[in-house]
C-alpha cells in the first residue's frame, strides 16, 4: 500500500496532467527529452514527469554523449536548446547567488541566443499587423537581412521616408505563445517543488517564477524598452560624451521598436578602435564616468553593458553610445545614499559603518546574524582590498563577494543590487581592456565625496525637512484620536499589554535616560512644527515681518536640540 506522501504526489501529478493541453504535452515531452539528453534524468524523476513522456522516448536508450561535460556546462547547453524562455530563465538565474553555486553562475553568464533568423516575409507580416500598413508605406528602404538576431527578435536597418537612418527591432513571430506555454509549465513545476521538494521551499520557487514572468513579459513589450531608452536619453541630454539613440515613437509598437541607427564600433574591438584613431583611455573614462552617473545621480542604469550593447561612435570625438535597453536597473534615492555611505566606509576601512549601512538598507538584521563573526569577515574583506593597489581592485567582484557574505549570513539582497554588481563587473572588464591603468575606484572617490558633501548642503536639508512636514502634520492631527482610542479601550478593559523579558533589570537606568531623550525629542519636534506653522500664518506681533512667537519657538528649539546633542556627546552615545 502506497504511503500517504506518495499518494498525494501521484494525485497532484494526475491533476496537473488533466490540466495540460495537447500543445503543452508536446512541450513537456521536449523538456523531458532534452533534460535526459543532457544527463538531468534525475530531475525528470524528482518532478514525476515520466507520465508525459511518449512511448518512443521511454523505450529509447538514454544518450551519454554529454556526460563527460561538467554539470554547469550541461545545464547551459540544455537551456540553450530549450529555446528563448529557458535562455532568459538561465540569464535571470545567473544573477541569483542565493540559489546557485558560483560555478553555475559563471557558466550561465555565457548563455547566448543562438537561434536562426526568421524570414523577411514574416518581418513584413509583423509590421503590417502592428501598423495596418505595408512595410513600403512606412519605410523608404528596409534591409532584407538582419543586423543582429536574438531569441525574442531581430534587428534590421531601415530608412524613413523623412530620411532618418534607423534600426528596427521586430519581435519573433509566435514567440509570445511559446513563452506563455513555457511559463505555465514552469509555474506547474514551481508549485510542485514548493509542495513536495523540501530543500527548494526556502527559495520561494513560485515567487521566483512570478518575478521571471514579470521580467520576460516586460521584454516582450517593446514600448517599455522605448520608455527606458527615453529615460536614459533625458538623463544624458547635457553630456556630450555619451549618446543614447532617439526613439521614433510614431514607428514603435508592442512588437516593433524603431530607434536612431548608431554607426559605431564595439567598444571591446581594440584593433578597430585603433584604426579609427580613437583614444582608448578617453573611451574608458567616458564609459566609466557614465556608469557612475547612472548609479549615483540618475538612479537608472544599463543592466547589460556587454560590448555588443556599447559602441564607440564613428565620426565623433570618443563618444560612447548605449544600445539595447531591455534590461534597465533602478535604484531609489535611499539606496543611492546607502551606496555612497557604503563606499565611503570601505575607503575609510571602517567595518562598523559598513555593517550599520547594510542594516539601514535592510540587507541584514542585527538580531538575525552572528554580529562578531560578520564584523570579522567584513574586516578581512576590507583588508584584502584595502592593501591592494587601486588598479587591481575590481569593484564589481568586491560587491559580489559582499553579497555572497550577506547571503551566507541569511541576509536579503535586493535584485537591483545583484544586477548592479553584475553590470559593474562587465563594465570594469571592458574598461580594463581599453585602458590597462583604468581604475573605477579612483574615478569614483571624488565623485562619491562630492555627493556626500551635497547631501549635507543646507538647501538639501531644508528640502528634506519641508518634504517631511506633511507627515509631521498628519502625526499631530491624528495623535489625539489615537490616544483617545487607547484610553477608551483601557476604560472598557479591552486593552491588553503583554511584555516578556529576561535579565533586563541591569538596563533600567539606561532605559530611563532613553525615555527622557525620546520625550525631549518629541517636544522638540512638536515645537519646531508649531513654530513653522505660526511663522507661516503671519501671527502678530511681528519683528522684521516674522512672528515673534514663531521665532522664539525656533530659538527655544535650538537650545533644546543643542542640549540633547551635548548630552549624547558627553556620554559617547551620539
Image (spheres, rainbow, N blue to C red):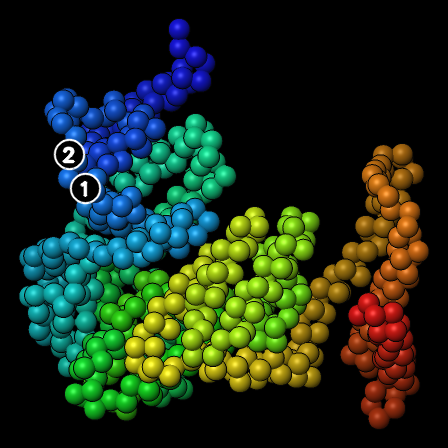
- Residue linked to disc 2: 63
- Residue linked to disc 1: 66
Give the image quarter of residue 78.
top left
Label 1 packing within 10 angstroms: few (<14), some (14-19), many (20+): some
Along the line of sight, the residue nearer the viewer: 160 or 374: 374
Along the line of sight, the residue nearer the viewer: 251 or 165: 165
Q: Quadrant of the C terminus?
A: bottom right
Residue at (47, 66) in percent of width and height: 398
Q: Are marks 2 and 1 in contact (CB under 8 Å)?
A: yes
Residue at (7, 57) in percent of width and height: 119
Q: Quadrant of the N terminus?
A: top left
Q: Indicate the position of residue 246 as horizontal and vertical percent values.
A: 29, 77
Which element is circle 2 on? loop
Q: Indicate the position of residue 315 as horizontal and vertical percent values.
A: 21, 89
- Residue 3, compared with residue 260, is above or below; it is above
Give the image quarter of residue 7.
top left
Which element is circle 1 on? loop
Q: Indicate the position of residue 300 as horizontal and vertical percent values.
A: 44, 69
Toward the bottom, the furthest residue is 544
Q: CA distance from mark 2 to mark 1?
A: 8 Å
Residue at (24, 36) in percent of width and height: 39
Along the line of sight, the residue nearer the viewer: 420 or 502: 502
Q: Is residue 99 left or right of residue 136?
A: right
| Residue 92 appears in the picture as rendered | no
Amino acid at each position: 500500500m502506497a504511503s500517504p506522501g506518495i499518494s498525494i504526489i501521484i494525485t497532484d501529478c494526475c491533476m496537473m496532467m488533466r490540466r495540460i493541453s495537447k500543445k503543452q504535452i508536446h512541450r513537456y515531452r521536449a523538456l523531458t527529452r532534452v533534460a535526459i539528453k543532457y544527463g538531468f534524468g534525475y530531475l525528470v524523476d524528482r518532478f514525476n514527469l515520466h507520465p508525459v513522456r511518449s512511448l518512443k522516448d521511454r523505450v529509447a536508450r538514454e544518450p551519454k554523449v554529454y556526460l563527460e561535460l561538467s554539470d554547469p556546462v550541461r545545464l547551459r547547453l540544455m537551456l540553450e536548446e530549450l529555446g528563448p524562455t529557458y535562455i532568459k530563465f538561465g540569464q535571470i538565474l545567473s544573477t541569483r547567488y542565493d540559489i546557485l553555486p558560483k560555478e553555475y553562475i559563471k557558466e550561465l553568464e555565457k548563455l547566448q541566443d543562438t537561434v536562426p533568423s526568421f524570414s523577411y516575409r514574416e518581418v513584413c507580416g509583423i509590421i503590417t499587423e502592428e501598423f495596418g500598413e505595408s512595410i513600403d508605406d512606412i519605410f523608404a528602404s528596409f534591409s532584407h537581412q538582419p543586423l543582429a538576431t536574438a531569441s525574442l527578435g531581430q534587428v534590421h536597418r531601415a530608412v524613413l521616408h523623412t530620411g532618418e537612418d534607423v534600426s528596427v527591432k521586430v519581435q519573433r513571430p509566435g514567440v509570445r505563445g511559446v513563452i506563455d506555454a513555457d511559463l505555465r509549465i514552469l509555474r506547474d513545476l514551481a508549485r510542485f517543488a514548493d509542495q513536495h521538494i523540501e530543500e527548494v521551499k526556502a527559495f520561494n520557487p513560485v515567487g521566483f517564477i512570478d518575478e521571471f514572468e514579470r521580467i520576460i513579459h516586460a521584454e516582450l513589450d517593446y514600448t517599455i524598452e522605448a520608455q527606458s531608452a527615453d529615460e536614459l536619453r533625458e538623463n544624458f541630454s547635457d553630456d556630450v560624451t555619451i549618446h543614447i539613440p532617439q526613439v521614433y515613437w510614431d514607428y514603435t509598437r508592442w512588437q516593433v521598436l524603431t530607434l536612431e541607427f548608431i554607426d559605431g564600433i564595439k567598444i571591446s574591438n581594440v584593433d578597430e578602435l585603433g584604426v579609427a584613431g580613437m583614444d582608448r583611455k578617453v573611451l574608458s573614462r567616458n564609459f566609466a564616468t557614465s556608469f557612475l552617473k547612472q548609479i549615483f545621480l540618475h538612479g537608472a542604469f544599463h543592466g547589460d553593458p556587454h560590448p555588443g550593447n556599447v559602441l564607440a561612435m564613428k565620426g565623433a570625438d570618443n563618444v560612447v553610445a548605449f544600445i539595447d535597453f531591455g534590461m534597465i536597473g533602478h535604484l531609489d534615492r535611499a539606496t543611492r545614499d546607502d551606496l555612497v555611505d557604503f563606499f565611503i566606509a570601505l575607503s575609510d576601512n571602517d567595518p562598523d559603518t559598513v555593517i550599520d549601512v547594510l542594516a539601514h538598507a535592510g540587507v541584514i538584521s542585527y538580531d538575525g546574524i552572528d554580529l562578531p563573526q560578520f564584523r570579522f569577515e567584513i574586516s578581512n574583506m576590507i583588508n584584502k582590498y584595502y592593501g591592494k593597489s587601486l588598479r587591481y581592485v575590481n569593484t564589481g567582484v568586491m560587491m559580489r563577494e559582499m553579497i555572497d557574505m550577506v547571503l551566507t549570513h541569511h541576509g536579503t539582497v535586493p535584485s537591483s543590487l545583484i544586477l548592479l554588481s553584475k553590470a559593474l563587473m562587465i563594465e570594469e572588464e571592458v574598461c580594463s581592456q581599453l585602458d590597462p591603468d583604468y581604475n573605477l575606484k579612483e574615478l569614483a572617490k571624488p565623485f562619491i565625496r562630492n555627493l556626500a558633501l551635497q547631501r549635507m548642503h543646507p538647501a538639501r536639508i531644508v528640502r528634506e525637512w519641508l518634504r517631511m512636514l506633511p507627515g509631521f502634520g498628519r502625526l499631530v492631527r491624528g495623535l489625539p484620536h489615537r490616544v483617545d482610542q487607547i484610553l477608551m479601550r483601557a476604560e472598557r478593559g479591552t486593552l491588553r499589554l503583554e511584555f516578556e523579558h529576561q535579565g533586563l533589570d541591569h538596563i533600567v537606568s539606561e532605559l530611563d535616560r532613553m525615555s527622557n531623550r525620546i520625550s525631549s525629542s518629541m517636544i522638540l519636534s512638536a515645537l519646531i512644527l508649531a513654530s513653522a506653522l505660526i511663522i507661516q500664518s503671519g501671527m502678530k506681533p511681528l519683528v522684521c515681518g516674522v512672528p515673534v512667537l514663531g521665532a522664539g519657538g525656533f530659538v527655544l528649539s535650538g537650545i533644546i536640540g543643542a542640549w540633547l546633542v551635548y548630552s549624547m556627546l558627553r556620554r559617547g552615545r551620539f
